C-alpha cells in the first residue's frame, strides 16, 4: 500500500538528494602522490555526540594536523560536505542491535585536499563510545584524486556500485564468522526484457527506468540493507541480519508487487517485471564474489524460466555451471581443432514427392563424448560468442557442399540449402556482407540459399533484424522463420517481415494425426501464410498419417524422420542420386 502511494507521488527524498549529490562530483584538488604512505592504525574514539575524543598518531600524519586541532571537534566537520548526509545516516543506524557500520567518506587534510577512506565504526554500548577505524581505499590509491563518487557510487542511480557492494558483503561475511547466529542473503535482480525497452523507447527512457527501479528497490528495503547497481540492468540487495530463509522471499514479494505496476516514463506507460536470484549465507561463503556469482546464476535460471519470478541458488546449479564451464573450454578447442561436422536432413516437396533441398545441422564430434547434439552446445556457444566463428564455418561449408552437389548432379541443380542463424549472428552488422562474400566465394546462387531465423532471435532487436532481413532479401537470399508458433512474434510483425517461408515447429506436428487442436492450428497457419504470400514447411514429420494431413491442407514442404534423419554429406549425396527413382 505504502509503496503505491510513494510511486504515485514520486517521493523519494533520500534517493533524490543522493542522486543530486553524486551527479556532478566536485572537482577535488589531487592528492599529491599515487603512492601516499599509509600510516599504521587510523583510529578515532568519538563520544555519543560524535565529538572526537581521541585520535591515533597516524591521523596526524595522514591529515597533516596536530592532535589538538583534531580533538574536541565534531567528527562531521571533518567530513567532506557532500559526504556528510550519508555519513550521518550511517552513524544514525547504530543501535544495540546493529553495532557496526561500514561506509566510505572523505576527510579534509590541512592543505584543503581530501582523502578517501573506508570506515568501520563500532558502537560500544556499555562505554557509550564509538570506535571509528579507517583505511584509505585501495582504489583511491590507484586513482589518486578521483572523486569518491566515481569510485563507489553509480553515477546514474546514485546507488552504491559493485565495488562498494562487494566491500559491504565482505564485511558482513566476516561478522558472521564470529557470530554464528547471524544470517544474510544476497538478492540479484535483473530487469526482464530491458534490452527491448531500451531499444524501443530509447536509451534516455532506459536510464529513467533504471533510476525508477533503483528508487523502488531502496523504497522497499530497510535502510540498513544495501541496494547496489551491479552493472547494466542488474541490481543487488544485501539483506543483513535476516531471521530465516523466508525473509528474502518476503522482501522479494514486496519488490515484485511494486514492480508490476506500470512505470510512467513521460508519455509512455511501461509495464516491467524482473527476475531474481537468491543466495543465502547458509551455504558458508568465504568470499563475497562467490555469493554474488551464485545469486546471479540463480537469477539467470529465473530468466530462463520466462522471467517475473525468483529462484534460490542450490548446489545442483553449481555442478551444472561447472559442467558448462568445462564444455565452454572444450568448445574453444573444438573450433581450433575443427571437430565440427555438417549433417544434412532432406526437405521434401509435398506436391512432387521429390527432394527439394537440405537443412544443414551442425554436429560436434567430441573426441571423448562422441556426437554431441546442437541442443546441448548451441546455447553455450551463443552465450560465449563462439557461435559467430562456428556459424561462419557452417554457412561456408553448407554453401560449398551444395554448390559441389549441383555441379556433380546437374539434374538436381535446383536443390536448396537451409542454414540456421542464431540471434547473436543476426545482431552483427557485417552479416549481410559475410553472406554476400560466402556466396561469391562458393559460387552458390543466392536463390538457392535459405537462412533460418527463429522468432525469439528476431525479437531481441526486431527493428534491426527487419533491416538486416530486408538487405538479405534485396540480395535474393530466401528467408525462413524457424520454430514458428513457439515464440511470441505478433501478427503485426509477421506481415512486416520479409520472410518467404514459415516453418511450423515440430511440437505441432507430433500429435497432428490425433489432435484436432493441432490440426486446426496448422490449418490456420497455412491459410494465414497464403494471405501473406508465404510458403509453409512442417518439421518433425515422422508418420505417413501426418504427411497425408499436411498434403490435404496444401502445405508446400515437409521435413522429418519419415524421410530421413540428418545424415553425413556422403549419405546425403546418396539421397540425391536415388531421388526420383522410387
Ligand atoms: P531446428 O533448426 O529446428 O532443426 C530441426 C531439429 O529437429 C534438428 O535437431 C533435427 O534433427 C530435428 N528433427 C528433424 N526431424 C525430426 C523428426 O522427425 N522428429 C524429431 N523428434 N526431431 C526431428 P538438431 O539437429 O538436434 O538441431 C537442434 C537445433 O539446433 C536446431 O533446430 C537449430 O535451432 C540448432 N542448430 C543446429 N545446427 C545449427 C547451426 O549450424 N547453427 C545454429 N545457429 N543453430 C543450429
Ligand atoms: Mg532450423
Ligand atoms: Mg525448427
Image (cartoon, rainbow, N blue to C red):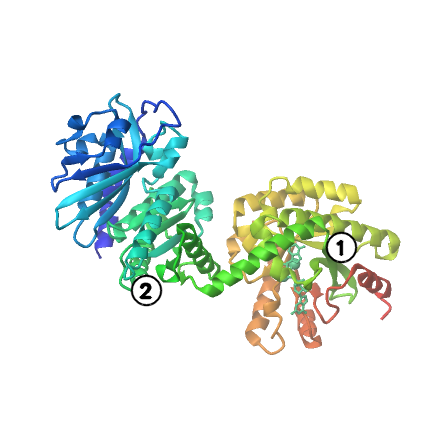
Asked which secondary structure carries label 2, the reply is loop
Q: Quadrant of residue 295?
A: bottom left
Q: Quadrant of residue 535?
A: bottom right
Label 1 CB, ligand 2: below 8 Å? no
Q: Which residue is mark 2?
A: 245
Work out whether residue 171 or residue 36 is closer to the camera in this orientation and state it.
36
Q: x and y percent of residue 540 in the render?
A: 66, 68
Q: x and y percent of residue 512 in the render?
A: 61, 74
Task: Name the N-terminal-most of marks 1 and 2.
Answer: 2
Q: x and y percent of residue 524 in the render?
A: 57, 66
Query: Which class describes the residues within 10 Å of circle 2: few (<14), some (14-19), or many (20+)?
Result: some
Q: Which residue is mark 1?
A: 416
| Residue 21 appears in the rendering | yes
For the C terminus, the quadrant is: bottom right
Which residue ends up furthest to the top in the rendered image?
A: 111
Apparent side of residue 409 relative to residue 220 in the rendered image (left or right): right
Q: x and y percent of residue 234 in the render?
A: 41, 48
| Residue 495 appears in the rendering | no
Apparent side of residue 176 relative to residue 414 in the rendered image (left or right): left
Amino acid at each position: 500500500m505504502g509503496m503505491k502511494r510513494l510511486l504515485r507521488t514520486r517521493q523519494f527524498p533520500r534517493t533524490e538528494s543522493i542522486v543530486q549529490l553524486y551527479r556532478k562530483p566536485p572537482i577535488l584538488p589531487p592528492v599529491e602522490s599515487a603512492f601516499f604512505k599509509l600510516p599504521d592504525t587510523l583510529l578515532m574514539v568519538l563520544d555519543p555526540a560524535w565529538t572526537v575524543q581521541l585520535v591515533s598518531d597516524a591521523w596526524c600524519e595522514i591529515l597533516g594536523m596536530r592532535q589538538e586541532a583534531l580533538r574536541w571537534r565534531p567528527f562531521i566537520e571533518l567530513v567532506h560536505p557532500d559526504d556528510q548526509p550519508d555519513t550521518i545516516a550511517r552513524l544514525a543506524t547504530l543501535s544495540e542491535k546493529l553495532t557496526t557500520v561500514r561506509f566510505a567518506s572523505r576527510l579534509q587534510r590541512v592543505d584543503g585536499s581530501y582523502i578517501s577512506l573506508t570506515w568501520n565504526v563500532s558502537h560500544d554500548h556499555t562505554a557509550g563510545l564509538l570506535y571509528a577505524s579507517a583505511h584509505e581505499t585501495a582504489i583511491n590509491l590507484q586513482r589518486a584524486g578521483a572523486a569518491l563518487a566515481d569510485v563507489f557510487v553509480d553515477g546514474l542511480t546514485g546507488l552504491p556500485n559493485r565495488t562498494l557492494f562487494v566491500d559491504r558483503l565482505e564485511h558482513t561475511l566476516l561478522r558472521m564468522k564470529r557470530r554464528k547466529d547471524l544470517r544474510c542473503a544476497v538478492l540479484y535482480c535483473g530487469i526482464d526484457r530491458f534490452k527491448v525497452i531500451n531499444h524501443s523507447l530509447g536509451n534516455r527512457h532506459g536510464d529513467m527506468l533504471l533510476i525508477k527501479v533503483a528508487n523502488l528497490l531502496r523504497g522497499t528495503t530497510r535502510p540498513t540493507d544495501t541496494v547496489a547497481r551491479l552493472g547494466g540492468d542488474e541490481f543487488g540487495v544485501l539483506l543483513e541480519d535476516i531471521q530465516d530463509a523466508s525473509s528474502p522471499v518476503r522482501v522479494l514479494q514486496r519488490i515484485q508487487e511494486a514492480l508490476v505496476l506500470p512505470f510512467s516514463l513521460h508519455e509512455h506507460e511501461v509495464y516491467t517485471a524482473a527476475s531474481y536470484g537468491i543466495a543465502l549465507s547458509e551455504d558458508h561463503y568465504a568470499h563475497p564474489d562467490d555469493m554474488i556469482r551464485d545469486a546471479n546464476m540463480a537469477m539467470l535460471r529465473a530468466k530462463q524460466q520466462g522471467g517475473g519470478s525468483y529462484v534460490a541458488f542450490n548446489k545442483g546449479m553449481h555442478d551444472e555451471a561447472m559442467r558448462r564451464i568445462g564444455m565452454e573450454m572444450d568448445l574453444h578447442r573444438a573450433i581450433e581443432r575443427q571437430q565440427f561436422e555438417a549433417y544434412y536432413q532432406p526437405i521434401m516437396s509435398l506436391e512432387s514427392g521429390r527432394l527439394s533441398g537440405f537443412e544443414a545441422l551442425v554436429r560436434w564430434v567430441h573426441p571423448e563424448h562422441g556426437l554431441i547434439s546442437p541442443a546441448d552446445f548451441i546455447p553455450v556457444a551463443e552465450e560465449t560468442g563462439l557461435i559467430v566463428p562456428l556459424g561462419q564455418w557452417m554457412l561456408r561449408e553448407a554453401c560449398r557442399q551444395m554448390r559441389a552437389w549441383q555441379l556433380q548432379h546437374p539434374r538436381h541443380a535446383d536443390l536448396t540449402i537451409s542454414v540456421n542463424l542464431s540471434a547473436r549472428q543476426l545482431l552483427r552488422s557485417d552479416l549481410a556482407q559475410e553472406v554476400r562474400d560466402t556466396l561469391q566465394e562458393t559460387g552458390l546462387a543466392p536463390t538457392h540459399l535459405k537462412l533460418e531465423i527463429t522468432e525469439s532471435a528476431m525479437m531481441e532487436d526486431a527493428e534491426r533484424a527487419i533491416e538486416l532481413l530486408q538487405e538479405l532479401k534485396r540480395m535474393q537470399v530466401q528467408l525462413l522463420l524457424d520454430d514458428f508458433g513457439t515464440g511470441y512474434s505478433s501478427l503485426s510483425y509477421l506481415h512486416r517481415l520479409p520472410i518467404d517461408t514459415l516453418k511450423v515447429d515440430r511440437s505441432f506436428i507430433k500429435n497432428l494425426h490425433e489432435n484436432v487442436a493441432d490440426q486446426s492450428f496448422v490449418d490456420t497457419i497455412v491459410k494465414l501464410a497464403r494471405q501473406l504470400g508465404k510458403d509453409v514447411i512442417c518439421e518433425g514429420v515422422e508418420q505417413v498419417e501426418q504427411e497425408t494431413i499436411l498434403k490435404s491442407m496444401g502445405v508446400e514442404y515437409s521435413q522429418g524422420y519419415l524421410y530421413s534423419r540428418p545424415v553425413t554429406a556422403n549419405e546425403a549425396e546418396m539421397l540425391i542420386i536415388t531421388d526420383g527413382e522410387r
